[in-house]
Amino acid sequence: MKLKLATAALSALMAAGPALADLVIPDLSYRTGPYAAGGIPFSDGYNDYFTLLNERDGGIGGVPIRMVECETGYNTEKGVECYESTKGEGALVYQPLSTGITYQLIPKVTADDIPLHTMGYGRTSAKNGDVFSHTFNYPANYWDGASGAVNYLLEENGGDLSGKKIALVYHNSAYGKEPIRTLEELSKKHGFELVALPVDHPGQEQKSQWLQIRRDRPDYVLMWGWGVMNQVAVQEAANIRFPMENFIGIWWSGSENDVLPAGEAANGYKALTFHNVGTDFPVFDDLQTHVVDAGKAAGAGDQVGTVLYNRGLYAAVLAAEAIKKAQEISGNAEITPAEMRTGMEALEMTEAKMAELGLPNFGPTFSVSCENHGGDALVGVTQWDAANKTWTLISDFKQTDGEVIGALIDEDSAAYAAENNIEGRC
Amino acid sequence: MFYREAGDFKTSYTDDSQTFPIKFDRYRYYVVLAVAFGIIPFIINDYWANALLLPFLIYAIAAIGLNILVGYCGQVSLGTGGFMAVGAYACYKLMTSFPDVSMFIHVILAGGITAIVGVLFGLPSLRIKGFYLAVATLAAQFFLVWLFNRVPWFYNYSASGQINAPERDVFGIIITGPNAPAWATYMFCLIFLAFSALIARNLTRGTTGRTWMAIRDMDIAAEIIGVNPLKAKMSAFAVSSFFIGIAGALFFAVYLGAVEVGEVFGIQKSFLVLFMIIIGGLGSIFGSFAGAAFLVLLPVVLKVVGVDVLGWPTDIVAHLQLVIVGALIIMFLILEPHGLAQLWRVAKEKLRLWPFPH
């Protein structure tokens, strides 16, 4: 019976499925579940920018964009279902916003010839385009994040971290474990001591970790958290009176959701970033007129200008620029996923281009190539001002330690290539 | 009319004790097998395989496994997720250590390893019962997940702690990895499900199954009539874990391809499989199938209807899905506490009398 129902529903869907010529962008979002607070603004930003392009410019290159949203709930099984149900519609690029789903999709997209853009998350060694042909993680990855944080601390300490103690509080999953290797290498190089403290999903229970921090008294605490774990960590840090300016989160631990619950106590908390914050950019005026005021904003429309909204917007900007590039290279306006991949590989973001899009100094400049799918690894630092409830960029986008990271990327991607019999293609 | 024993004469004991004594039932079973093995593989596509059929087949194996332990032997277990993880990691270690060996052997060996682990964690069941045993198996769940997260040997020292299924084949046909054709993965799981169901069905109506049920119904009485509780309970844990291990290995290697233990084999998985057998029917092989189908297909159907047909926002549909599935579970448990299998039994009983119910 249920099978029959499903068949009926599916055949109805297939009959009704439009065969229109448009650019299909799937949005594997999560507006429900324990990580929804992060998923909603990102998805809103991602959707709104494409809506803006449709409303203001009539799409990209004259072809309208069609968004297909699919709820994953940050769950890998649902992510697979979403991928399978959307890929047949001619999806151009996937942006799952989940490291778990990314690991699932890396082999699948390669087999199906669809590009995957994991902006600032996913598998770090995918930066090596020689091995990971269809996965892109520009403009920055976790290991850049780890190195960026250490570089920032080096700057703070006059270039010397020897004898310092740095604790890493991380989500005990593939995502949270990513920076450990880099930080271990960096601790050898710069002579600081690293203490790794795992927090289990979903992260509400962190008393023992912070007790240990209170006892060990590390000079700095780094955090790789997501969802509710961030808020709890900031609150716990405030409870043990850990100095907030010595507490640095990765970019997934640096949104309004994470610091607002702790109120005044969160003042001075820092987070890494690879894009700018706030609404002080010309493109937000267009968004206001064409999308928000027109009542076409995604979700509740109340997220405009938050950190994660801006990140979703930035992801959409990069996707749109890659589509333009692909149209330019292939010569036809209705590109295929394979042409989209070529476009992403030839993407070049310059300051002039960002200014033209109405986003001056919004993100770092970078270029993508066959060997380098990860951009130029520029990472900045933001700080929370609890009184004004705003994030500000306190350290501009700076180069990370390419020497240490490059060696690790080569090692990890070579292991993947050997495991899966992949030959270099560049 | 046609659904009855009348006229269907049995001339031997074997005939008399077969699984489907009614001719109509028997033919229906052959038709289902013929469709599953002979027709679906030719029309299947990626979406049907990966979104519906593979999870259904694999969860059905896990549900059969858990049903043996909970439904037939009466030992409550909340460690299903952990045991599935054992199967998955055993399969991964075998796949990467012996790349040339057929996947069939890897999956069966993974089941065997899980059976050993299951027996180890089943030992407390000799001393404790009911809720206390549930807590002991819950400990197994958390311990196993912690172990696979903690010891890098299990995930071959990869940077992220994830395990990825490399490409492996059976007789030259690729079964795992992204290039595996939909029909091959489907057939691979179907063969395991068919054999699991066959073995489980025959075990449960033989001596072994009777000793399990005796223990379930009243362990002291069973001991007095000569059932060895050690043997009965340990064999139930072993057989149950064997199937659950196979399900875990297939879940990782064939269905998902990449697994992060805390997310995929967490406590939710244990509850999900337990719900499947409660909704499907405790102590019934058919119930395991029905429960797995119910909990795998219903969310997808609701999603297709809500998002693709009605065009509602995805978050509202996702919330509604929780509400509807929850409401249906409560409704089923109130209207038919013995699950879908009992509904099916009642329907059959009615069919037999139809059209003259008196």
Image (cartoon, coloured by chain):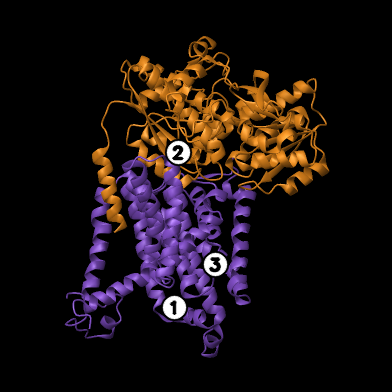
The local secondary structure at tag 3 comes to: loop
Nearer to us: label 3 or label 2? 3
In the rendered image, residue B326, in percent from the top left (x then y), is placed at 46, 57
Toward the top, the furthest residue is A352
Q: Do the residues labelled 2 and 1 touch (CB within 8 Å)?
A: no
In the rendered image, residue A338, in percent from the top left (x then y), is placed at 36, 26
Any part of residue B170 in sight:
no
Whole-number angstrom distance, CA of label 1 to CA of label 3: 18 Å
Is residue A236 left or right of A85 when viewed as pictured?
Answer: right
- Residue drawn at 52 percent across, 78 percent down: B232
Give amino acid for label 3: Ser
- Name the residue tied to disc 2: A105
Whole-number angstrom distance, CA of label 3 to CA of label 2: 33 Å
| Quadrant assignment for the N terminus of chain B | bottom left
Colour that chain B carries in the picture:
purple
Nearer to us: label 1 or label 3? 3
In the rendered image, residue A346, in percent from the top left (x then y), is placed at 44, 18
Mark 1 Cα within 10 Å, few/some/many (few <14, many 20+)?
many
Colour that chain A carries in the picture:
orange
Residue B169 lies, with reference to residue A2, above or below; the image says: above
- Name the residue tied to disc 3: B77
Of the numbered discs in the image, which one, if any, rests on residue B112? none
Give amino acid for label 2: Leu
Report the chain holding disc 1: B
The disc, 1 or 3, on the residue closer to the chain's N-terminal end is 3
Viewer-nearest residue: A300 or B114: A300
Give amino acid for label 1: Gly
| Quadrant assignment for the C terminus of chain B | bottom left
Q: Do the residues labelled 1 and 3 touch (CB within 8 Å)?
A: no
- Name the residue tied to disc 1: B209
- Residue drawn at 23 percent across, 77 percent down: B352
Viewer-nearest residue: B13 or A394: A394
